[in-house]
Image (tube, rainbow, N blue to C red):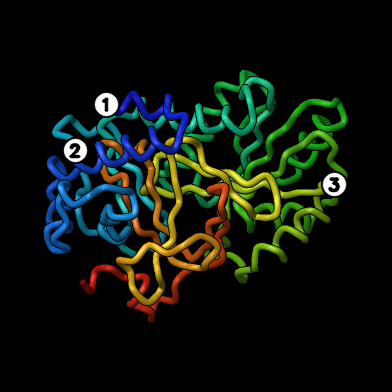
Amino acid sequence: MKDTIFSISSEKQFVKTAIEFFKHQFNNNRVYRSFCDLLYKHPSDIQQIEEIPFLPIQFFKSRKILSSLDEVQEVFTSSGTTDAITSKHYLTDIELYKQSYLRGFSNFYGNIEDYVVLALLPNYLERKGSSLVFMVDDLIRKSKHFESGFYLNNLDELAETLNNLDKQGKKVLLIGVSFALLDLIEKYQFNLQNTIVMETGGMKGRRKELIRKELHHLLSKGFGVSEIHSEYGMTELLSQAYSKGKGIFETPPWMRILTRDTEDALTIQKIEKTGGINVIDLANFNSCSFIATQDLGKVYSNNSFEIIGRFDHSDIRGCNLMVI
């Protein structure tokens, strides 16, 4: 069943597969089943994807979210402070994750072998269990360029490599966490012609949070590029959405974004209204494909979306389905 997700090519096919996955996870995921039971939601009630219950993302911090009895092959953990409770995503099929991010990248950017991949992800490299590091490490290997690699605090070496590759006309993907990219352009100014600069979001407590428009303005000016690309992913998801500029994201065919009403967490609202981000990620076949995140955003008619911010921690109405 899970192998069918990468051949999805129509809305009808997506909806059919999503409902089949809901039935599978309802029957095989004890945590999700209990949540659905609390809402009096049964597969016989579900005719469209808007009716599927979305599991609050906080459950990944307190429960083992699994829809499979197979052996766990990998556990991804979220970043957080020393005292914070982190999310854990248990994977029983690591190959499904690999297929998802490789096909997803190819869907938006083409063959990974066309790029030299430079990764500036210091906070992720400094801990274990990062799904982002796992993905980027594999992309680096599959790029087959000896110049590809990770950079921790060696900004001088990165700047020299980046300038040399760009001047040689090589296609470069520079992927980095926001605060580290800002550190780089505060020390160096660039005028890149052949490089994609992709931020993965988050200041991670290292800097004051900036709105996307301000962040992208600073990065565009510092790197000398017209657009800043972005990656939207998280520990609890096995797929990524990408933005090629202006903060407008698109999903691969097996992923979909909906928004829920900020006053009524169980109501899916119409397009172009700001609401809580709900994600359908069919690559999460062995965990849970239907997740209510703590992000705020807006979905457009072509299924693209943007992230506007996050729910305030004090707001339990729209953000926290746990109160139900």
**Tag in front: 3 or 2:** 2
Marks 2 & 1, CB-CB < 8 Å contact = yes
User: Is residue 60 visible in this depiction of the protein?
Assistant: no
Marks 1 & 3, CB-CB < 8 Å contact = no
In this rendering, position of residue 128 left or right of residue 18: right
Question: Residue 113, percent across and down?
Answer: 64, 20
Look at 55% across and 63% down and name the residue there.
Answer: 272
Q: Quadrant of the N terminus?
A: top left
Element on which disc 1 rests: loop
Marks 3 & 2, CB-CB < 8 Å contact = no
How many discs mark residues in the rendered view?
3
Label 2 environment density (alpha carbons within 10 Å; few <14, some 14–19, many ≥20) = some
Q: Mark 1 to mark 3: distance in Å?
A: 47 Å
Three-letter amino acid code of the residue under disc 3: Phe
Question: Residue 102, percent across and down?
Answer: 50, 28
Q: In terms of sequence position, does the residue under pointer 2 or pointer 1 come before the other?
A: 1
- The residue tagged 3 is 190
User: Is residue 230 visible in this depiction of the protein?
Assistant: yes
Q: Mark 2 to mark 1: distance in Å?
A: 10 Å
Question: Residue 314, percent across and down?
Answer: 38, 81
In this rendering, position of residue 162 left or right of residue 253: right
Q: Mark 3 to mark 2: distance in Å?
A: 50 Å
- The residue tagged 2 is 24
Q: Quadrant of the C terminus?
A: bottom left
Label 1 environment density (alpha carbons within 10 Å; few <14, some 14–19, many ≥20) = few
- The residue tagged 1 is 1
Q: In terms of sequence position, does the residue under pointer 3 or pointer 2 come before the other?
A: 2
In this rendering, position of residue 35 left or right of residue 305: left
Look at 28% across and 55% down and name the residue there.
Answer: 51
Three-letter amino acid code of the residue under disc 1: Met
